[in-house]
Image (cartoon, grey):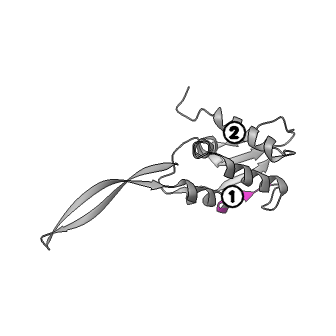
Amino acid sequence: MCYTWCFVTYCVTLSGESFKWRTSLILFNYCCHLFDLYIQNTVYDGEYHARHPNIITFWEAFEELTDDQKKAFLLFLTGCERVPILGMDKIQITVAVLQNSTELHFPESHTCYFLLFLPIYPSKEMLLARLKEAVAHNRGFWKE
């Protein structure tokens, strides 16, 4: 499972009058919820739309990724492997067709714009294999 650690500050009343601020480190499970936010916050460009067969196949393949692979996808798409401080609902993904591509091409992303270029694949198996390969060989901003 994917988890994220968050610092939460809260106020505790002591003796009815004085307040003491405490900070706790709590663990949140965000992966289940992450999948829904990705779909909700996605817009499509060009010939892609929510009911396009390749898009339906993409979301089915995405759902089959392991939690670590979904985290790697976040890195692939945004350049950062952590959920933004304002939350995933602040990320709007745009998915467009990778022009002049074949099923041999891998998905590409422009991290500054959360833009995913997705070739049209003939099967879910091929799409899933290309997606896994693309996210597995991602470097992010801080890696050499």
Q: Amino acid at mark 2?
A: Lys
Q: Nearer the viewer, residue 75 or 91?
A: 75
Badge 2 marks a residue whose secondary structure is helix
The residue positioned 67% from the left and 52% from the top of the image is 63
Badge 1 marks a residue whose secondary structure is strand
Q: Nearer the viewer, residue 136 or 141?
A: 136
Question: Where is 12 relative to 27, above or below?
Answer: below
Query: Position of 4 compared to 76: left or right?
Result: left
Which residue is the site of mark 2?
132
Which residue is the site of mark 1?
42
Residue 116 lies in the magenta-colored region: no
Residue 52: percent from the left, percent from the top? 83, 58
Q: Amino acid at mark 1?
A: Thr
The residue positioned 85% from the left and 39% from the top of the image is 103
Question: Where is 68 relative to 90, above or below?
Answer: above
Magenta part of the protein: which range? 40-45
For the C terminus, the image quarter is top right
Question: Where is 51 relative to 97, above or below?
Answer: below
Report which quarter residue 8 is drawn in.
bottom left
